[in-house]
Image: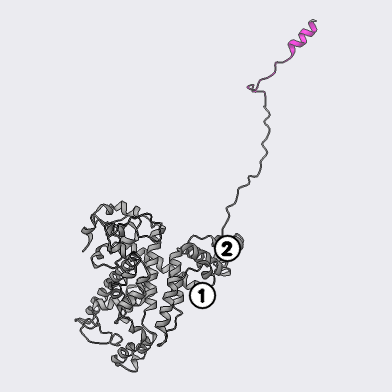
Amino acid sequence: MKRVLRRYRRQKRPKTQGSPDVVVYKPTQVQRNRIVPQRTNLEDVPVEIQQSILHQMPDLPTLQALISASPSYLRAYQSQRHPILSNILLRDIHPDVLFDVLAIVNALKLPRNYDDYVPQMKVFIEQYKTARDSLHVALKQLEPSIKENVWEFHLSVIDVTKDFCDYALSTHPVTGHSLNHRTSLSPNEVRRIHRAFYRYELFTVLFRESDFYHNEQIERHRDRDPDRARLAVQRDSIRSLDDQDRSFLFFALFRAWEVEEIACVRDYIIHRYDELHKQCKSEWQEMTGRESHYRAAPWNDSSEWVSEMYDDQSCHEYYLSLGLGFFCTLMKASHEDQMQMLRENIGLSDLSLSSALEDDGPFWDSPMYDACIDRAFQEFHSDCDRDAPNAAWIWSAEDKVDIRYYQSDKAGLRTWGYVMWDKERLNQWSILHENPHDYLH
């Protein structure tokens, strides 16, 4: 027993972990390779996915930015540009606007000969009036080259829309203070502005000067007789249409507030032309050191400024007749090129957009004629209602039905594009609580 106890006493106490003689075993951690997900480079995805991405582009500027920055996406676009353009044009351009885009494409195909143009133009206008075909089918049937032209032109319309907003939204319509922070345009506001620009272009396409007139200008080096060209344009059948004819044929197609949208665009373009035209005159007078009062023809190679025969208003109307393409090109050009373009295109135009707007039009044919005569009330329902005016048009008419367009006393309202904006924006300005008579001149 003693031996057993003694043996027990000789046993060493188990050493704790804190003892200096103990080495605690720590299992080594197995080093595992961490799998770091690599970022997917959009340039490296298969071409099918790139094409799918291109099909989903929200608008034309986004598409242009992508294919301009990426050679691989440019190749993917070129391999399927026809369906890609169809999808994006349908997505980016409102159906109301796209209808006018396609109308311009068809109007450009009308023959420009002496005998048949006006009758065929009248047939075209009747078809435009009643056409209700599917825009999807009509767009898909366009040739790729025409779609490319539509794309480029619509990008120009987007650019000039931004400038229109800078012009119309520069000051608060009530307080007159500068508007430095402007909210983005709503889809309905974009629809109204784009529609007005394209309808202005359609007017200039339908009633533009004959190619025969431009051929007479080309021959000026051989025959410097201004009367020759003037007599030539009088023989052109398009000249048989006076201001009332153009008003009845074209502006009678639209409701009064839609014509007022075109009038707002017209006033904006005239304003821009007036700014550049005055600069051009001033610079030319500084170069010559004198006032120019020469009765020279617009194609006179001496480049004399014609201030007596071609007054500012006449020049503005001629520039208007050149259409939206000329205006967009002019706005993007350098200052030197702008001055050169204005000098080279000075002229007279008997086919005045302004004079056609100022004509009363066939208001008695309007389905709202009786309501207008009776001064019936008109209520605003929604900006999404494509067949109704915006709230500012009703406000300007004192909540009464009004079928008149381009009223001279509303020139002040057109400076801020009153028929273009949604009620939300108008409420932010508190304009609808003002007396409209205070804004009429």
Question: Which residue is drawn at the image coordinates 41% and 65% (left, top)?
Answer: 158
Question: Which residue is drawn at the image coordinates 47% and 73% (left, top)?
Answer: 149
Say whether residue 5 is magenta. Answer: yes
Q: Is residue 349 visible?
A: no
Question: Which residue is drawn at the image coordinates 22% and 86% (left, top)?
Answer: 294
- Numbered mark located on residue 51 in the image: 2
Mark 2 vs mark 1: which is more N-terminal?
Answer: 2
Mark 2 falls on what kind of element? helix
Neighbor class of circle 2 (other Cα within 10 Å; few <14, some 14-19, many 20+) is many
Give the extent of the magenta segment: 2-23
Q: From the viewer's perspective, is 391 left or right of 85?
A: left
Compare residues 381 and 114 and report the one nearer the observer: 381
Closer mark to the observer between disc 2 and disc 1: 1
Q: Is residue 371 visible?
A: yes
| Residue bearing mark 1 | 145
Q: Is residue 432 above or below residue 8?
A: below
Q: Is residue 403 above or below residue 308?
A: above
- Farthest left residue in view: 290
Q: Position of residue 38 (x, y in %)?
A: 59, 51
- Name the amino acid, label 2: Gln
Q: How many marks?
A: 2
Compare residues 253 and 201 and report the one nearer the observer: 253
Q: Quadrant of the C terminus?
A: bottom left
| Pointers 2 and 1 in contact (C-beta within 8 Å) | no
Q: From the viewer's perspective, is 52 left or right of 224?
A: right
- Farthest bottom residue in view: 222
Q: Position of residue 72 (x, y in %)?
A: 56, 65
Compare residues 62 and 385 and report the one nearer the observer: 385
- Name the amino acid, label 1: Ser
Q: Is residue 19 above or below residue 187?
A: above
